[in-house]
Amino acid sequence: MAKDFKLVLSFLVTAMFFISCYRDKSTAVEYNKTIELNDSLNTISIENKSSLPVTFSLSINGIFPLYFENISNKIDAISLQEKLSKQEAAYLFVRRNTFYNSPYSTETWQHEPLLFINSIGGGFCDDLASVLAAVWKNEGDSVRIMNIDAHVIPEVFTDRKWQMLDPTCGTFYTNKKGEKLSVEEIGNNLNAMFATNADTQYFNPLYRGRTFLSVYFSKLYEAKEFFRDVTQYSFNYAQTPKQFTLPGKSSLQISYNKEFGFANILVCLETNSKGKLQLPLVPFSAKGNMSFAANNKVFHLNDTSVLLPTKSYINEIEIAQVSGKSEVNYLVNPKLKFLKTQNRIQLNSSAPLVIKATKSNKPEIQFGATETFVGLKSLDDILFFNKAKTKTSTTNIDSLKQQFLQAIKTSNRVTPKEREELIQLYNEYLSLIKSKVK
């Protein structure tokens, strides 16, 4: 009898296992669709019509969101096409996909490389240094992050020595043999910072020779008593989840802002929307009529909007109640150009979703969008990576100024005083660029 009971029990356990596997497979849904965007339909909509949260993975055109596998492939392509080492190619990848900007948060959570590259995009020198060091580390390199008083820079150990490549300034320095110098070696050989024979297109021309900027930074390298290894501090962050989760009765809206050339991402909520909301991006604002919890704090919105706190990363939002149309807005790195006319959507979901093109209203100008015209449409785009420098003209620069003025005019995140300061800064910067354009 006992033997028969064990056989029956074994059969039941096995049957339950196979039923469970079948059920999991039957509810999993794989999508591979092409969505066309145009002036009339400018948004990719991914809608969860059920009342329960749905979790899924997402890839748009194979390039967003970026994961380390994508980044490694891009680094390999840069290395091959431009005949550079993997370390130099990684430096260029970070330079081309980030920008210098007042940081979204001053905390180290935003140093997480995938979160920074996909969502935030801009920050101070410590942010850019940490991201490049993390990319190098993922490629298998030994790295360290150095603080030289008022500046933070990364180093990578390659060719049997430490080498510094600065993603913030776009600089690196070499000895007479052409070997890249470490932070310590630069401090012992300041003349290397004033070399005028650095004609490589990958070296920022504003630092070539004895300029105001090169002299200023030489003072930092000269003060060797202030050098500190801040690697452990800079890498103090948690990994970003890769999955997307939409609460019940909600939709993910991915729009193209044609006026500024950026993508905007938000989650639209309606009455009866409820449950977990999680994206591998940074939620920066919410508006409408709803109650939700994030990082142990409860928010109640009554036809109002709120900028979400930046002290710590908001990994997950729990939607408790929604009345009418509401939304949560997410940061998207404005340097990532991942939307096209024809967009390939690859999605694996725990339950059915509706994927289609739709029309959205003009998206809100978000963090980085205004400053982008200082950081992105500056020397980096005009001179630094422009091999055909003769094509640059003062007409191009004047056009950029008009774009910038329009950007800050429409931004609701810039005060009148900040607007005046930005215009003054941009005028000075454009004058400097014009002096470099012949």
Image (cartoon, helix red, strand yellow):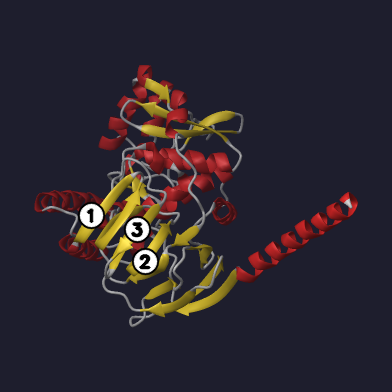
Q: Nearer the viewer, mark 1 or mark 2?
A: 2
- Which numbered disc flags the more N-terminal residue, 1 or 2? 2
Do the residues under discs 2 and 3 have CB atoms within 8 angstroms?
Answer: no
Locate residue 170: give its quadrant: top left
Residue on which disc 3 sits = 320
Residue 197 seen in the figure: no
Q: Estimate the x, y position of residue 266 in percent, counting from the top left.
A: 35, 64
What label does residue 273 carry, if any? 2
What label does residue 306 carry, if any? 1
Q: CA distance from mark 1 to mark 2?
A: 19 Å
Rate crowding at label 2 as few (under 14), some (14 to 19) or many (20 or more) other CA atoms within 10 Å: many
Q: CA distance from mark 3 to mark 1?
A: 17 Å
Indicate left or right for 135 with 26 as reference: left
Rate crowding at label 1 as few (under 14), some (14 to 19) or many (20 or more) other CA atoms within 10 Å: some
Residue type, label 3: Ala
Mark 2 residue element: strand
Residue type, label 2: Ser
Q: CA distance from mark 2 to mark 3?
A: 8 Å
